[in-house]
Image: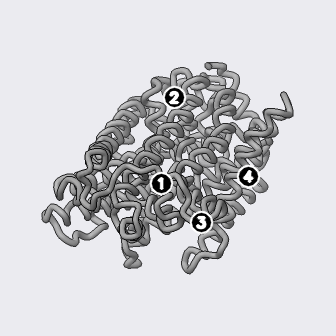
Amino acid sequence: MTGQDSSAQPRSESPAHRPALRRELRFPETVAVSIGVMAPTLAMSVTGVAAAQALGRAAPLAFAVAALGVGLVAYGFVRLAGEFSHAGSVYAFVGNTLGPRPGFLAGWALLGTYLVFPPVSIMGVAIFGRAFLDTTGLAPDADWFPLALAAWAVIWVLATRGVRPTTRSLLAFEVVSVCLILVLMGVIYWRLAAGTAPRGQTLSGEVFVLPPGVGVSVLALAAVAGFLAFAGFESAGSLGEESLLPARMIPRAIITAVAFGAVFYVACVVAQTLGFGTDAAGVSAFQHSQAPLGDLAQRYVGTALASLLDLGAALSALGAGLGGVIVAARMMFAFGRDGLASRRLSDVSAATGVPQRALALEMLIALALLTAFRLAGTSALNVFFYLATIGTLSLLVMYVLTNVAAARHLGRRSPGQVVAPAAGVLVAGFVLYHSLWPVPPAPYEFFPYLVLGWLAAGLIITAVIPGFSRKVGDGLDRVAGAGVK
């Protein structure tokens, strides 16, 4: 299930006007989407503190455990992506294994995530862009909205150029931003080894030993924060009709993204923990830092690197926004092609191979969200975390559904193959549960109801569209009939 020809189009369209995504992406461009949506630089700029607050000097353990959990969740995606290649990713993964309605609901949950994730990324650009302008003195206390609008416009322009130039831009942003963190990490490790750290810190294995009184249950809860740093690892699945060899490239891309995240995140949080220090004063400094990478850059190198790291985080967020609109546009394209939404959403530009109407709708929704929050006077950080929470809850629902699908599909072949995806269901379910309980303070306590309403709307759609199951089944069969692996 990977390719697309005239048989994969609605019967009402002539061959000359059929939708046609272009199969042109090589492996580096495919993996760029998964790594880009994970936004490793942005993740390391905001997630390490939560782990330090729970585990103290053992914060790196949270990311090591999270990597194992993500690996279990990713296993189901890897196996299904090796068999079903489709622009709707989980829509096809689950639809081909559990049936049309669960498939649509999985795709609907993913769409809910990627309607809000690009605005989250845009807010990341605005937040770290403001920090860069402030630390350099170029524009202290800049308003976040003009910066967000500029990022929104850049993402739209880059996304309209075609999937290959878009993914290359995304890869370039992430390479630059990650390299900036690697410079800081290298300096920290060098000075620790040489005994010239600011407070006399040295290399130590204490970061992988739980402090006295901290149990495994606390470690498991701390790993939830680490798990969320991997959100988006599955994004390459949306390139099933644009990768050259999707049945091989997409599973490899997902594995590579998770493996890269595991190594980079653990090494980075080790550098942060040791950089602040493993004694009480150092742990406290890490736990209360608003910008740990910037603070460490100031201590170990100077203001120039701290400013560049802010710029790198903004670039990472820009790349995440690009990856997010790729995923959302492909999902809307798939729904439109199968008649589950306006068929205009399946229109593809003859010049670029981009589903332009779907992309435009995604960008207009992002603009509407940003504008609404600006008119409401919401702070940039609150916009970031509000939307990130909503998107993550919907994403976790999709993770559970996809792994249930993988367990059923693989279990038909051998009972032993159920174990890994079943574990993935438990891991994703655990993270989802602890994202809901204990009940978070307002307004976060209301966000689960928004996600529940979105999912309920998806269920209503499956009931009111005439011939829903037939449309989904026929659509998935037509793409499968292309048979390009």
Q: Amino acid at mark 1?
A: Glu
39 above or below 48? above
Judging by the rendered image, the residue that carries numbered circle 4 is 426
Between disc 4 and disc 1, whose residue precedes?
A: 1
In front: label 3 or label 2:
3
- How far is mark 1 from mark 2, CA to CA? 46 Å
Residue visible at 23% across and 52% down? 196
Give left or right: position of 194 versus 34: left
> For residue 222, what is the image quadrant?
bottom right
Q: Left or right: 202 with respect to 410? A: left
Query: Residues at badges 4 and 1 in contact (C-beta under 8 Å)?
Result: no
Circle 2 residue = 242
Compare residues 79 and 266 and report the one nearer the observer.
Answer: 266
- The residues bearing labels 3 and 2 have C-alpha atoms spaced at a distance of 47 Å
Question: Would residue 344 be seen by someone viewing this image from the given angle?
Answer: no
Q: Secondary structure at mark 1?
A: helix
Q: Which is nearer the eye, 431 or 23?
A: 431
Q: Secondary structure at mark 4?
A: helix
Give the labeled residue for mark 1. 206
Q: Identify which amino acid the numbered label 3 is placed on.
A: Val
Residue 10, compared with residue 67, is above or below; it is above
